[in-house]
Image: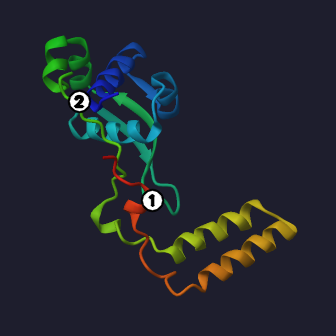
Amino acid sequence: MTNNELSRKVLKTLVAKSGSMRFKELVETLGTDARALFKNLFFLEEKGFLQLSTSYPPESVYPQIHLVRLRKRGEDAAKDPARLDSAFPLSDDTTDTRLHIPPELNHTLTFHKALDLLAARVRQNLAGDDRDAALEKIESLLQLPFSHEAVPLEAIVPEKP
């Protein structure tokens, strides 16, 4: 599905659902990838079609979307085919599959930080010998000479050709 097709579906779905929906419900209703919808919703909010209710969970880079509300501009566009075509032409075949990281955060994740986060998750979710073994493995990886280097994000999420 293209970005414009997704934008159209979002607006039309919100009109049908009385103007607001929870993010998880919208993902399920549209049957789309949550990451693609996440980026699309912020675009629609920036353009004045939607209002998002968000929060920043501890240690997160991105906000969490809780509720999506349709603004008047979005409702008008969804109900008027000419406005919809003008704002989101179906001739646009671009899809956005890249991971978008703000420039100031692009190189702040190091292997060491990623392993620290993994260790915290292990401490929370494992117990006993499994926990000790996992933490021991993580500790050995922290000793690698390149553990403080930035994680090359393009290696994690390569751009599609």
Mark 2 secondary-structure assignment: loop
Please state if 49 lies on the left or on the right of 87 as rendered: right
Q: Classify 10 Å Cα crowding around label 1: few (below 14), some (14-19), many (20 and above).
A: few
Q: Quadrant of the N terminus?
A: top left
Going by the image, does 102 lie left or right of 142? Answer: left
At 25% from the left edge and 30% from the top edge, which residue is drawn? 49
Secondary structure at badge 1 equals: helix
Q: Residue at x 19, y 19 (%)?
A: 84
Inter-mark Cα distance, 2 to 1: 25 Å
Left or right side of 5 for 142: right
Total marks shown come to: 2
Give me the residue at 62% from left, 67% from top. 118
Q: Earlier in the sequence, mark 2 or mark 1?
A: 2
Tell me the amino acid under the disc marked 2.
Asp
**Splitting the image into 4 quarters, where does residue 73 fall?**
top left
The residue carrying mark 2 is: 93
Say the numbered circle drawn on residue 30: none
Across and down, in percent, residue 128 comes to 87, 68
Give the residue number, with chain letter if any, for mark 1.
156
From what the image shows, is residue 78 above or below residue 154? above
Q: Is residue 130 above or below residue 23?
A: below
- Its colouring scheme is rainbow
Extreme front residue here?
161
Q: Within 10 Å of the Cα at label 2, are there few (<14), some (14-19), or many (20+) other Cα atoms?
A: few
**Residue 75 position within the rendered picture, expressed as x and y whole percent measured from the top left:** 26, 19
Image location (x, y in percent) of residue 143:
60, 86
- Residue shown at the point (30%, 32%) measured from the top left: 50
Q: Is residue 118 left or right of residue 108?
A: right
Q: Quadrant of residue 3?
A: top left
Quarter occupied by residue 51: top left
What's the residue type where badge 1 is placed? Ile
